[in-house]
C-alpha cells in the first residue's frame, strides 16, 4: 500500500508492506480436488479460496453484512421492480398481442 503525504511544498512518499505468513495444510485427495474445483469455478487461486473460507469461519468476513452495506448505500434500479412482476409481464404480453 502506498501513501503520499503532502504538506506545504514537501511531499513524503511512504511504502507500507504487510508481511504474510505461509501456511502449509495437508489435505486428502478428495478435499484437495473440491478446493481446486471450486477455486476454478470462482476464478480465484486456491490460496485466495482458502483465505476467504478461513475469514468466513473466523467471523472476519460476513457476506450478509457486506450485502447489507451495498444495499443500504446504493439504490439499484426501481425499488418496486420485483413487486407484481408477473402481472406486469402479463400486461406487457397482452399489449404486444393487441398491437
Image (cartoon, rainbow, N blue to C red):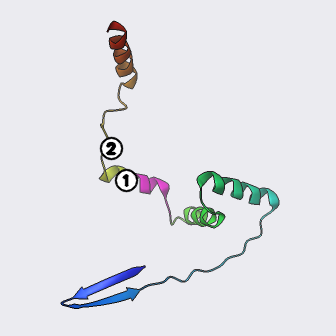
* Residue at which label 1 appears: 70
Q: Residue furthest bottom?
A: 10
Region in magenta: 61-68
Task: Determine the secondary structure under disc 1.
Answer: helix
Image position of 5 with respect to 90: above or below: below
Q: What percent of the width, then of the height, locates residue 6?
A: 25, 86
Mark sitting on residue 11: none
Residue displayed at 38% across by 20% down: 89
Q: Helix, strand or loop at disc 2?
A: loop
Q: Between label 2 and label 1, give the one nearer the viewer.
A: 2
Q: Quadrant for residue 36, please give it.
A: bottom right
Q: Which callout, 2 or 1, points at the residue further toward the start of the chain?
A: 1
In the rendered view, tell whether residue 82 sits above or below residue 88: below
Residue at horizontal 34 percent and vertical 32 percent from the top: 81
Give the CA distance from mark 2 to mark 1: 10 Å
Q: Which residue is mark 2?
A: 76
Amino acid at each position: 500500500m502506498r501513501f503520499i503525504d503532502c504538506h506545504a511544498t514537501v511531499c513524503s512518499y511512504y511504502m507500507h508492506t504487510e508481511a504474510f505468513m505461509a501456511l502449509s495444510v495437508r489435505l486428502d485427495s478428495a478435499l484437495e480436488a473440491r478446493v481446486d474445483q471450486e477455486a476454478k469455478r470462482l476464478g480465484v487461486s486456491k490460496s485466495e479460496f482458502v483465505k476467504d473460507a478461513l475469514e468466513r469461519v473466523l467471523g472476519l468476513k460476513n457476506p450478509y453484512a457486506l450485502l447489507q452495506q451495498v444495499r443500504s448505500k446504493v439504490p439499484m434500479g426501481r425499488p418496486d421492480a420485483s413487486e407484481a412482476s408477473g402481472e406486469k409481464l402479463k400486461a406487457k404480453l397482452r399489449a404486444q398481442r393487441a398491437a
